[in-house]
Image (tube, coloured by chain):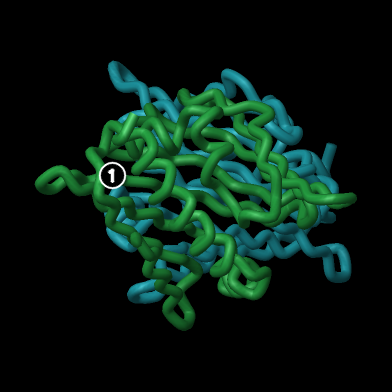
Chain colours: A green, B cyan
Amino acid sequence: MAKTQITAEPGIPQIIMTCEFDAPRDLLYRAYTEPELLQQWLGPREYTMTVKENDVRDGGKWRFVHSDEGHEHGFHGVFHGDPSPDGTVRTFEYEGAPGHVSMETLTLTERGGRTLARTVSSFQSVEDRDAMIASGMERGVHDSDERMTELLARLQAG
Amino acid sequence: MAKTQITAEPGIPQIIMTCEFDAPRDLLYRAYTEPELLQQWLGPREYTMTVKENDVRDGGKWRFVHSDEGHEHGFHGVFHGDPSPDGTVRTFEYEGAPGHVSMETLTLTERGGRTLARTVSSFQSVEDRDAMIASGMERGVHDSDERMTELLARLQAG
């Protein structure tokens, strides 16, 4: 089972996440960009995730809503540059904390049929970074790891 | 004459710039947002700066071109959140280095008729931050300080 390593060094307003999956990178990139696949793995299990928009191109917008009974959490941002498996840059805002923006760079590197996914998130301040960690992000990430592993197995079996 | 303090700490992928101007913050905010004012102060003196677009609202785009004889340098990005003198967040890309995106937060604070402008730029990596500094940014910033001081004097005299 893949498990994301989360690194957040003192005084540096970034979170670096790395995870190796047993799948080729083209499949990983599809799972990160296609709405019907994203909805199957991103976020905690108890939430239903809906991709409202995911326009993966320079200047394109994305918006995802995670909902359970009675609660909705919206997230959105903008893609920057020319997104590809070598580098996809997007901004990230939680709609419950307007004005707090971070920027994510995802790179996918394949080695022998396995793929390393590396995400660097840069924040406006260490306080913003620490608020993201305090929000319970880690559990969501590890649910996502498990769900991504399951999805990749289904896709490769199919 | 106002002079920007530029802080770039080792290992931290940010540049922090602070400068105090002898003007009320509403005037500073106009100078930072109105195309006809921006064109009078932003960038090195020997370049003509043209504001192609500056849509100061959540999701709005901006694009500036600095040109001298035979050379053009384009910069663009997207505003995030609800821009105001209390906080204006935008992304920043130099078109000569695609894929390298930074994020800037400008806050303007008035004290006794003077205004402190503080800009935090967050980069994807320390290498990207160092490349920005190596590009000769500091001279452009200090030209801009002088030109802003002159513009504010003209606006307050008029």
Q: Position of residue A10 (x, y in %)?
A: 46, 83
Residue at the outermost front position = A157
A22 left or right of B52 in image: left
Q: Position of residue B12 (x, y in %)?
A: 40, 71
> Measuring 38% from the left and 46% from the top, which residue is drawn there?
A106
Image quadrant where residue A133 sits: bottom right
Instruction: Kindly state the secondary structure of the residue where label 1 is placed.
Output: strand
Mark 1, residue position = A108
Image quadrant where residue B53 sits: top right
B78 and A153: which is toward the camera: A153
Name the kind of residue labelled 1 in the image.
Answer: Leu
Q: Position of residue A45 (x, y in %)?
A: 62, 54
Residue B108 in view, yes or no:
yes
Q: Position of residue A31 (x, y in %)?
A: 42, 36
> Measuring 74% from the left and 44% from the top, which residue is drawn there?
A74
Density class for disc 1 (Cα within 10 Å; few <14, some 14-19, many ≥20) is many
A36 and A76: which is toward the camera: A36
B28 left or right of B3 in image: right
